[in-house]
Image (tube, grey):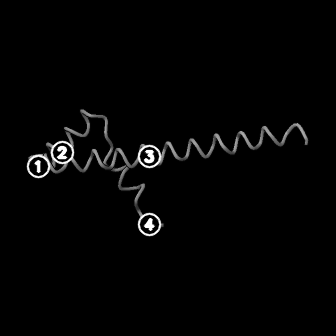
Amino acid sequence: MTPGVPRQREMGEAGQRSANTKRENALQNDRAARVVASRAVDAGDCRDLLDMLGLDADAARAEHRPD
């Protein structure tokens, strides 16, 4: 086995874990943003609450947008 092969496999696994983590974070952000939106009084209230919580509704929408 060549020395580069295990390293490439590790990088592939690390990349996959990173992608999985990003996907899971986006899903959690989306769920949290939906809960905030359902409890907000109006759009301004929703924006303020999302901002206070560090949530990004635009990122969640972009993640689910069809290509």
Between the C-alphas of marks 2 and 1, the distance is 6 Å
Q: Pointers 2 and 1 in contact (CB under 8 A)?
A: yes
**Image coordinates for residue 41, horizontal then vertical, percent:** 8, 47
Q: Is residue 34 above or below residue 18?
A: below
Amino acid type of the residue tagged 3 in the rendering: Glu
The kind of residue tagged 1 is Asp
Mark closer to the chain start, 1 or 3: 3
**Mark 2 = which residue?**
46
Disc 1: which residue: 42
**Which amino acid lies under the numbered mark 2 shown in the image of this protein?**
Cys
Is residue 2 rendered to the left or right of residue 21? right
Which numbered tag is attached to residue 66? 4
In the rendered image, which residue does mark 3 sit on? 24
Graded by Cα atoms within 10 Å as few (under 14), some (14 to 19) or many (20 or more), the crowding at tag 3 reads: few
- Between 33 and 62, the residue placed more toward the observer is 33
Camera-near label (1 vs 3) is 3
C-alpha distance separating marks 1 and 3: 28 Å
State how far apart marks 4 and 1 are (Cα).
Answer: 27 Å
Callout 4 environment at 10 Å: few (<14), some (14 to 19), or many (20+)?
few
Q: Secondary structure at mark 3?
A: helix
Proximity of marks 4 and 1: CB atoms separated by less than 8 Å:
no
Along the viewing direction, whichever of 64 and 9 lies nearer the viewer? 9
First in sequence: mark 4 vs mark 1:
1
